[in-house]
Amino acid sequence: MNWLIGFCIAGLIALLACRLRLLTAGGASAAVVVGTSVFGAGGVWSSLPMVGFFFTSSLLPRVLGRPHATEQRTAAQVLANGLAPTLCCWGAALLPAYAEAFWLGYLASVATATADTWATEFGVRFGNPVWHITTRRRIPAGESGGVSWQGTLAGAAGASLIALSGQPLIQAGEPIAHAAALGCMGMFLDSLLGATLQARYRCALCATLTERTVCCGAPTQRMGGLRGIDNNAVNALSTLATAAIGIGSAC
């Protein structure tokens, strides 16, 4: 019954998100898959962290007045942050003997996604100075691999909030702090991967550094990183890594 209820609730939320222009049609379909899996495996309590991540990550840019506030999330963006939590939920449902380990991995992955989003939004809006995580040179806010104390504090707050919202999933208090810590670790891992593996491009017309392969209507030139590794891939890698560490540490 949980799976049917989850499908209906996820469908309604996805429909509302489409109406609010938070998701594309593909993003809504992916969100239904993720939401059904989360609610089906753990009911209301497992859904709270994911709902908290989705709405804060979608509304924060608008609240903070970010330029991309009106952009809709695609299926790739939804799955980049939702794949790891979904796999953890299926693990908890199919392997009940290890359910608590999978729930820890679930909370760690959602905490990572939330911490990264909050750090990015607050860092771009308020971050000063912003430092490159590997070279320690000052860079413009919003550039891949950048960290600031403002963004870091916001990310830690987001990870802690997600961990606390999932407390009913795990009986002991210590794993909750563990999940929050893993979320913060995942936030820095995301920045590290963004600084080293993520492809970076420069526009030949406006000379802007960007993550896009097209700018000002013309192809951009790759300046570093691996071709095909974009922000979605970095998000997926960081959330999958923290989920795996969470599961492994609890087994």
Image: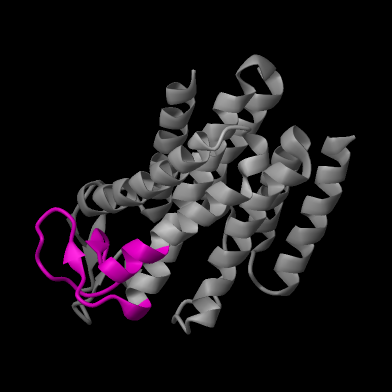
Task: Return the residue found at the far front.
Answer: 173
Q: Position of residue 131 (x, y in %)?
A: 17, 66
Q: Position of residue 234 (x, y in %)?
A: 37, 48
Judge by depth and name the residue closer to the eye, 201 or 218. 201
Q: Position of residue 177 (x, y in %)?
A: 46, 42
Highlighted magenta segment, given as a residue range: 125-154
Judge by depth and name the residue closer to the eye, 239 or 157. 157
96 vs 83, left or right, is right
Q: Position of residue 245 (x, y in %)?
A: 41, 29
Q: Residue at x 30, y 50 (%)?
A: 188
**Is the residue 145 above or below the residue 82 in the image?**
below
Residue 114 visible? The answer is no
Main SS class of the magenta portion in the image? loop
Name which quarter of the figure residue 224 lies in. Answer: bottom left
Q: Residue at x 57, y 45 (%)?
A: 82
Work out which quarter of the rendered image holds the N terminus and state it. Answer: top right
52 vs 184, left or right, is right
Q: Residue at x 52, y 40 (%)?
A: 176
Name which quarter of the figure residue 25 lies in. Answer: bottom right
**Is the residue 137 above or below the residue 96 in the image?**
below
Q: How many marks?
A: 0
Residue 183 lies within the magenta run: no
**Is the residue 91 above or below the residue 14 in the image?**
above
Residue 222 visible? The answer is yes
